[in-house]
Amino acid sequence: MRDNLFNNNADIADFRFDADVVKVFDDMVRRSVPGYDSMIQMVGLVARMYGQDNTNYYDLGSSTGAISLALALNNKNKNNTFIAIDNSAEMVKKCQANLSNKIDNLQVLCSDITDTKINDASIVVLNLTLQFIDVGARAALLKKIYDGLNPGGVLIISEKIHFEDPETQDHITKLHLDFKRENGYSELEIANKRQAIENVMITETKKNHIDRLRDCGFMETSCYFQCLNFVSFLSVK
Ligand SMILES: C[S@@+](CC[C@H](N)C(=O)[O-])C[C@H]1O[C@@H](n2cnc3c(N)ncnc32)[C@H](O)[C@@H]1O
């Protein structure tokens, strides 16, 4: 269903992943996040390279389940459990409906990822999710993921970032706005969405992410994908 949630002059409340967003999420994310489909495709490649037998694959902030599906379709290993976690009950329902007949060994959990145990993992994915976690809680989450990964396991983080250099920030932001316009969003929709999301989604720089990953134990992190102000990091334990 096409996203026109912000095409009105109503008062703007903080953005929530509620039933209205669930209905339009797949359209919204593709028209708002440059390179979204490539991000998903890359997760599939990583799954093929780093997946291990007898381990769990985690999709944290799973929304409608695109990452879990990519992990499962690309899995070459044996005896894996796919664990998709989201704290939006409406998203969990949609994820279950999308995936239950497509993935064996799937668990879809309605839970806060900061409270959920991670264990026996070879792949953990935070695709566009960490940016919605309180900045002060991010290190503890990443440390917990590091501790729950087996040696040789990987964490993939995709995020919207901002740039240290104000000029770069300005130029890339303009290109991102043009991307949204080209995908049919009006100036009103762009302004309303920005207002709704500004207190909810807190971006950081590439350096912030890489430094924190190192502090949490990940000695090897590469920024292996970037499209404008959206990046993916691959961290190997
Ligand atoms: C932008 S969406 C993620 C998109 C999805 N990973 C994908 O690639 O299609 C962010 C998701 O994170 C979930 N989320 C945000 N904070 C969370 C938390 N503390 N615990 C669990 N899920 C959370 C939201 O409900 C939302 O579904």
Image (cartoon, grey):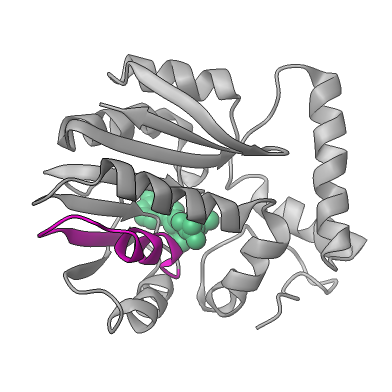
Residue 68 counted in the magenta span: yes
**How many numbered discs?**
0
Residue 162 placed where, x, y %? Answer: 68, 30
Residue 151 placed where, x, y %? Answer: 16, 29
- Residue 233 shows in this picture: yes
Residue 89 counted in the magenta span: no
Q: Which residue is painted at 85% across and 42% down in the image?
A: 175
Tell me where residue 9 sits by quadrant. bottom right
Q: Is residue 162 left or right of residue 111?
A: right
Residue extending furthest toward the right: 187
Q: What's drawn in magenta, residue-wise?
A: 64-84
- Residue 118 shows in this picture: no
24 w.r.t. 125: above or below: below
Residues 60 and 53: in front is: 53
Q: Which quarter of the figure is the C terminus placed in?
A: top left
Residues 220 and 108: in front is: 220
Q: Which quarter of the figure is the N terminus placed in?
A: bottom right
Q: Is residue 80 left or right of residue 214?
A: left
162 w.r.t. 127: above or below: above
Quarter of the rendered structure image containing ligand 1: bottom left
186 w.r.t. 131: above or below: below
Residue 106 placed where, x, y %? Answer: 21, 69
196 w.r.t. 46: above or below: below
Q: Is residue 68 left or right of residue 122?
A: right
Tell me where residue 103 sits by quadrant. bottom left
Residues 216 and 103: in front is: 103
Residue 83 placed where, x, y %? Answer: 24, 60
Q: Which residue is painted at 83% across and 74% down in the image?
A: 8
